[in-house]
Amino acid sequence: MNFLEEIYSLVAANNPNEAIDTLFTYIETLLANGRFDACNELLKQVNINKLDTNLMIGFLAITLKAKDKLPARKQLSHNIQHWLQCHEPKRNKSLMSGLE
């Protein structure tokens, strides 16, 4: 099972804490090892419809410090913001604050 499949499975199994821990550990390892290309490719593949709101924000939070090296993050951020506008309109601005 690849990383994203594991995240999607944890979300589907209603195991958000393990999903967040897995997300942060994996992405932190990629970034710490300078694997920005791999991280960028991963961000291109994220299906936000298979994530919960916490995981969406988690992807943006954990990649914030490297956003200048992750061009795909901008599109992911846009997609998440659009999703939040449709599904969480009252919380959209507060959830996205500081993550763009």
Image (tube, grey):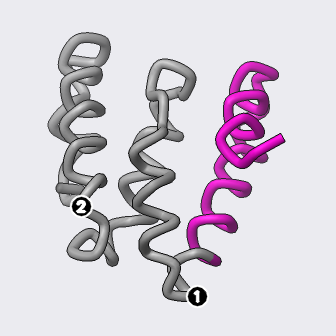
* Magenta stretch bounds: 1-29
Q: Residue at x 30, y 66 (%)?
A: 70
Classed neighbour count for the residue bearing mark 1: other residues with Cα under 10 Å, few (<14), some (14–19), many (≥20): few
Q: Residue at x 65, y 41 (%)?
A: 4
Residue 33, numbered circle: 1
Classed neighbour count for the residue bearing mark 2: other residues with Cα under 10 Å, few (<14), some (14–19), many (≥20): some
Front residue (pair 67, 55): 67
Front residue (pair 46, 88): 46
- At which x and y percent is residue 39? 48, 64
- At which x and y percent is residue 55? 52, 40
Q: CA distance from mark 1 to mark 2?
A: 18 Å
- At which x and y percent is residue 28? 58, 74
Q: Residue at x 71, y 57 (%)?
A: 21
Residue 71, numbered circle: 2
Which quadrant of the figure contains the C terminus?
bottom left
Residue reaching furthest top?
86
Q: On the rendered structure, is 89 left or right of 16?
A: left
